[in-house]
Amino acid sequence: TVILLTLGFGCMVFVNVGYLTWMPSFLVDKFGLSLTHAGFSSLFYHHLGAFLGVLSGAKIADHFAKVNPKARLGIQAVGLLLGAPFIYGISTNSSPFFTYAALFFFGFFRGWYDSNIVASLYEVVSPKIRSSAYGLMLACAFLIGSVAPFLLGVLKPTLGLTMGLASLSLVYLLGSVFVGCAAFFFFDKDRDNNAHE
């Protein structure tokens, strides 16, 4: 479960770092915005959505986890799954309004994922090693994510930034698969074996 959660986290960070690096340049190129306006727009709408998504995702997960602890992983998987179309939309929409709406909902469903990162991990990790497990998870995820700006830069001259950013939606789908597999195939056994040692 921890390995799959780490891979899912890596997918989310890969998308987030790639998006954060290239989105301002994309908005400048596509809509002719100033770099200041593009920098603000690429972050504000996304993080406004993430703010609301974190609050709602945490509330939903806490509610359902009372009955089934794997609900936290389920909310994470659904957040990545529902966020993927909006990642595609931020790069393919033809108007700033719909691009900003896509940024908002991309952030909103990312918030569902983010609100459960630590709680999901702690469900299957012994209290004695939780800080170490989370530290290792973070290190691996950010190592994976650090590759995204380079790959998008390499693809930009041939594939184009529009399709490069749109392809990040596939990485979100892959992350959803990793977290979903962790929930359905490994969570119960790993929780019983490790969480209460």
Image (cartoon, grey):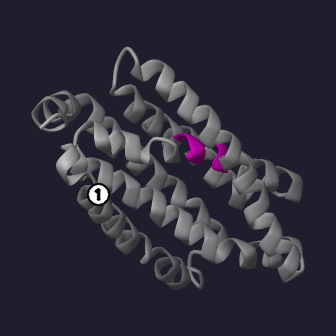
Q: Nearer the viewer, residue 141 or 135?
A: 135
State the residue at coordinates (78%, 55%): 45
Across and down, in percent, residue 9 comes to 39, 55
Q: Nearer the viewer, residue 97 or 118?
A: 118
Most foreground residue, 139 or 171: 139
Residue 108 included in the magenta stretch of the image: yes
Magenta-drawn segment: 106-112
**What is the magenta segment's predominant secondary structure?**
helix
Q: Is the residue 71 above or below the residue 144 in the image?
A: above
Q: x, y (%) of residue 68?
A: 34, 19
Mark 1 closeness class: few <14, some 14–19, many ≥20 residues within 10 Å: some
Q: Looking at the image, can residue 30 be seen?
A: no
State whether residue 159 is above or below residue 120.
below
The kind of residue on which mark 1 rests is Ser
Residue found at x 40% / y 23%: 65
The residue at which mark 1 appears reads as: 131
Tell me the quadrant of the picture where the C terminus can be found: top left
Q: Is residue 180 visible?
A: yes
